[in-house]
Image: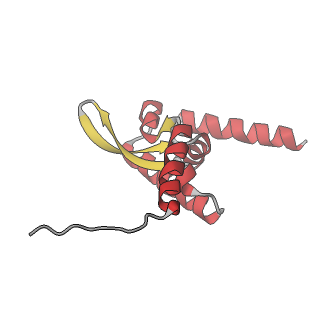
Amino acid sequence: MEISIFRKEYGTSESITHFMDFYYSLQMKYLASDLLYEGLTPQQISDAVLRAIKVGKSSGLDIHQHFKPLFSSIDREIIGDCKLSQLGYGLVLMNAEAKTSAVGNWQLKVLEKYFKADL
């Protein structure tokens, strides 16, 4: 005997949610693993992503628009990764350890642009 699960109605909110997740995913052009090539370790990247998500949540940011967990393949190895929007990528860089020059230089550029716009 087989048991079938039947739903009489599918909520439009479910299909809209799936469509919006797909749409947001198209806007995410960056991978957190790209920061490996900038000198960050996998642990530093993971920590920076978690801090960036916390910052986004505390600021009222819709996290699904900027962060999407996924798996990537690097050197024939499957790793946990995160697809990022431009804002998500920036938040990760702002929350990464500034021990690498790429992170420190990017943070300085952001602050310079901010203060020039403020003048």
Q: Nearer the viewer, residue 53 or 1?
A: 1
Residue plotted at (57% across, 50% down): 65
Q: Position of residue 100 (x, y in %)?
A: 51, 37
Residue plotted at (50% across, 43% down): 25
Looking at the rendering, which quadrant does residue 115 occupy?
A: top right
Instruction: Give the quadrant of the C terminus.
Output: top right
- Asked if residue 6 is positioned above or below residue 84 in the image, the reply reads below
Q: Is residue 98 visible?
A: no
Q: Position of residue 77 (x, y in %)?
A: 24, 36
Residue 58 vs residue 42: left or right? right
- Asked if residue 107 is positioned above or below residue 75 in the image, the reply reads below
Residue 16 vs residue 5: left or right? right
Specify the farthest residue to the left: 1
Specify the farthest residue to the front: 8
Q: Position of residue 102 (x, y in %)?
A: 55, 33
Residue plotted at (39% across, 41% down): 41
Residue plotted at (63% across, 36% down): 106
Q: Nearer the viewer, residue 36 or 99?
A: 36
Q: Position of residue 103 (x, y in %)?
A: 56, 38
Indicate the colouring scheme: secondary structure
Residue 6 vs residue 97: left or right? left
- Counting labels gives 0
Looking at the rendering, which quadrant does residue 109 occupy?
A: top right
Instruction: Give the quadrant of the N terminus.
Output: bottom left
Q: Nearer the viewer, residue 62 or 15?
A: 15
Q: Nearer the viewer, residue 88 or 47?
A: 88
Q: Is residue 45 visible?
A: yes
Looking at the rendering, which quadrant does residue 111 occupy?
A: top right
